[in-house]
Amino acid sequence: MSANNAIERVNHSLTLEEDLSLHIKGWKTQKVGGLLILILMILTALGLFGEGPLSARKIVNGDITVEYERYLRYQKEMDVSLRLSNQANVQIAIPIEYLDCFKIEKIVPEANESIISDGKVVYTFNVDKTGETILHFYLHAQKPGSAKGTWEVNHHNFQINQFIYP
């Protein structure tokens, strides 16, 4: 039985033009649209537009771990956290081109020294060599679009790729 035969035609005295094939196309379009909205809602809940499993990134290189959000909102604060084990002095170099997309709100703990060298801002921290050290960089996204940069932590490179939604 085809879709046209499944719909009962009603005989009435009004002079209305009925185009059942147009109604069927409309119903199919509504179903597809509803499905697309459902998929978008699920992706949003999973973090496609901000915090969540699709957005969370964790990079491990030796005794150093960098965690950040891949998808951000314009002017929303984000946290880049670094975990280091058994490191006496910590030196973090961030490219200036990367920092053009962000405003550094605060660094916890504060760096002992910060200098600009070779197109990078270099932060130096004196930490206890034993145990684990956790550093937090709190940044505000300043430009919508793609933000890419290679953070260098104690001569280990970490490629950070982010997208900032307007």
Image (tube, grey):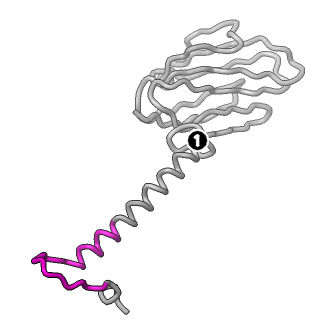
Q: Quadrant of the N terminus?
A: bottom left
- Up-down relation of residue 23 to residue 133 (above or below): below
State the residue at coordinates (44%, 23%). 142
Q: Amino acid at mark 1?
A: Ser
Q: Quadrant of residue 158?
A: top right
In magenta, the rendered stretch is 8-29
In magenta stretch: residue 95 = no
- Up-down relation of residue 42 to residue 50 (above or below): below
Query: Outermost residue, left direction?
Result: 15
Query: Outermost residue, bottom direction?
Result: 1
State the residue at coordinates (52%, 45%). 48
Q: Secondary structure at mark 1?
A: loop
Indicate the position of residue 132 as horizontal and vertical percent values: 84, 24
Indicate the position of residue 58 as horizontal and vertical percent values: 68, 38
Q: Nearer the viewer, residue 91 or 53?
A: 53
State the residue at coordinates (75%, 31%). 64
Q: Nearer the viewer, residue 96 or 137?
A: 137
Q: Quadrant of residue 78?
A: top right
Q: Nearer the viewer, residue 128 or 81?
A: 81
Q: Quadrant of residue 134?
A: top right
Q: Which residue carries the number 1 mark?
A: 55
Query: Outermost residue, front direction?
Result: 13
Q: Quadrant of the C terminus?
A: top left
State the residue at coordinates (33%, 66%). 29
